[in-house]
Amino acid sequence: MTALEKWAREVYGRAAAKPGALRKALFQTSSGVEIEPLYGPDEPPPSLGFPGQYPFTRGVQPTMYRGRFWTMRQYAGFGSAEHTNERFHYLLKSGQTGLSTAFDLPTQMGHDSDSPRARGEVGRVGVAIDSIDDMERLFKGIDLGQVSTSMTINATGATLLALYQGVGEAHGTKAADLVGTIQNDVLKEYMARGTYIYPPGPSMRLITDTFEYCTKNIPKWNPISISGYHIREAGSTAAQEIAFTLGDGIAYVDAAVRRGLDVDSFAGRLSFFFNVHNNFVEEVAKFRAARRLWARTMKERFKAKDPRSWTLRFHAQTAGSTLTAQQPDNNVVRVALQALAAVLGGCQSLHTNGRDEALSLPTEASARIALRTQQIVAYESGVCDFVDPLGGAYAVEALTDELEEKAVAYLHKIDEMGGMVEAISRQYPQREIEDAAYAAQKEIEEKKQIVVGVNEFQNEGEAAFEMLRIDPQLEEQQIARLKTFRRSRDNAATTRSLSELKRAAEGTENLVPRIVAAVKSRATLGEIANSMREVFGEHGH
């Protein structure tokens, strides 16, 4: 029996034999050609392997999308909790299979909506969440026991998780049954995005506290989504995106292990978040290289024993930085190609951007087109009937090897500096990203890289495009609601819980249970962040 036959019988066959394991009984083309589960050599090289097996180059599940499609998440969050809740219900009704939440800058930076530092930003680039009442309104009519929710939140990630837990428990869903992800990746904030609060030391403590808390209390939750997306949006190359994302991941795993956590107790719940850029074949290769490199890192460097600890599971989002304000309908094509690259690269979850996101937050119509793009790839393209259809292609495999080599070279440099935290403090990844961004922009300006509708094939006098506009009264309404919330609570109980959180921050205990207690005592997000600011200070201050 060849290795391929053995895999087909013992790995794929066992997985496919489970009731409901496959989407349909027969996979065939429109010409009636039956599609084999996997195509490739009888004895593949170790670097290629098989789907669902180390080193996972060909995918983390043996059946991949023959079993089920990726989770279709459309990023939503703007204005008030009620506005975003309406969009959630609209997207779920349209066939979305998971929620993905964007928060406004004050929420991301740990400021309540009535803070002077929040002025002009409330509800602008995401939803404003100050309190557990806001969280309640955000998920009104949605059973948190039946939906997976991703939250793009970092410095205040533990607080948003606590708010989510509080709402779930209030409606009868135990913490152990909650499913979802908080981004919670602060290292890339110092490197590429900027929504940090505390210095790196306390930030790493909060992240490892969350790992430990989730392992014990919310075992189905992904406590981090290690994010290359924003690194790429800041201008990195594909190889840099792999290297700096996995470098951050190594730092988090190392911190958790040094904390005393067994690597296999949390590594299987780590998730990743990657960008899907324009260079189609390179993007497919990027995901394969990242998966293989992470598997080897976890197995060899951290000595993880559980195969689930070796798997790189990732959410992908099409590249916002590639969208153009000129001829915005062209973005539909860009997004479709990027979505297909994510699927051929083996993503577990996907968000497709709206065509208008270079101009504003997406309208309902644009969000619907973006979701329909995923559904067309899933149900009409036929690519999901194959397990890793591009595996073995000469160009794909050569690029996979090349990107992995380039990423490894970066990781060696980072190790020589003493790890990612030290490399960031020396501005090493920041400089590399800036240089790459400058080189890419120069190519566009010199027309060495064509961007359709921008530096070539322009239209004169383009018609105005419908945009989503945020009600300017929203900020006042949110502040009024926040003041009512504070008047209605037991302020003595809130003050006690915040004092206990501050004392815990001064010591070494896990802070997440204290944050959960503060949320349940009706402390606001800004009050919780400020209690820790008093102990940790702010980065750069």
Image: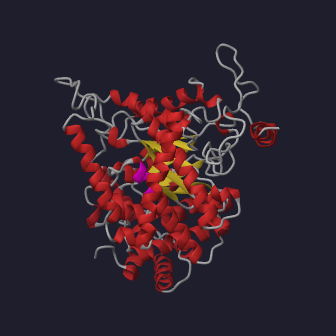
Taking the image as shown, residue 92 lies to the left or right of residue 15, namely left
Residue 116 percent location from the top left of the image: 26, 66
> Is residue 512 something one can see in this rendering?
no
> Is residue 93 something one can see in this rendering?
yes
Q: Main secondary structure of the magenta part?
A: helix
Magenta stretch containing residue 240, yes or no?
A: yes
Residue name at image x 74 percent, y 24 percent: 26
Residue closest to the far left: 461
Taking the image as shown, residue 472 lies to the left or right of residue 68, namely left
Residue 188 percent location from the top left of the image: 40, 61
Which image quarter holds the C terminus?
Answer: bottom left
**What colouring method underlies this structural image?**
secondary structure
Vertical placement of residue 495 versus 109, above or below: below
Count of number-bearing discs: 0
Residue 488 percent location from the top left of the image: 45, 68
Query: Residue 71, located in which quarter of the rendered image?
Result: top right
Residue name at image x 51 percent, y 79 percent: 497
Query: Residue 526, located in which quarter of the rendered image?
Result: bottom left
Vertical placement of residue 359 versus 528, above or below: above
Camera-nearest residue between 342 and 418: 418
Residue 84 percent location from the top left of the image: 44, 46
Camera-nearest residue between 296 and 145: 296
Residue name at image x 32 percent, y 61 percent: 430
- Magenta-highlighted residues: 239-243
Residue closest to the far top: 31
Magenta stretch containing residue 3, yes or no?
A: no
Vertical placement of residue 503 versus 49, above or below: below
Which image quarter holds the N terminus?
Answer: top right
Query: Residue 484, located in which quarter of the rendered image?
Result: bottom left
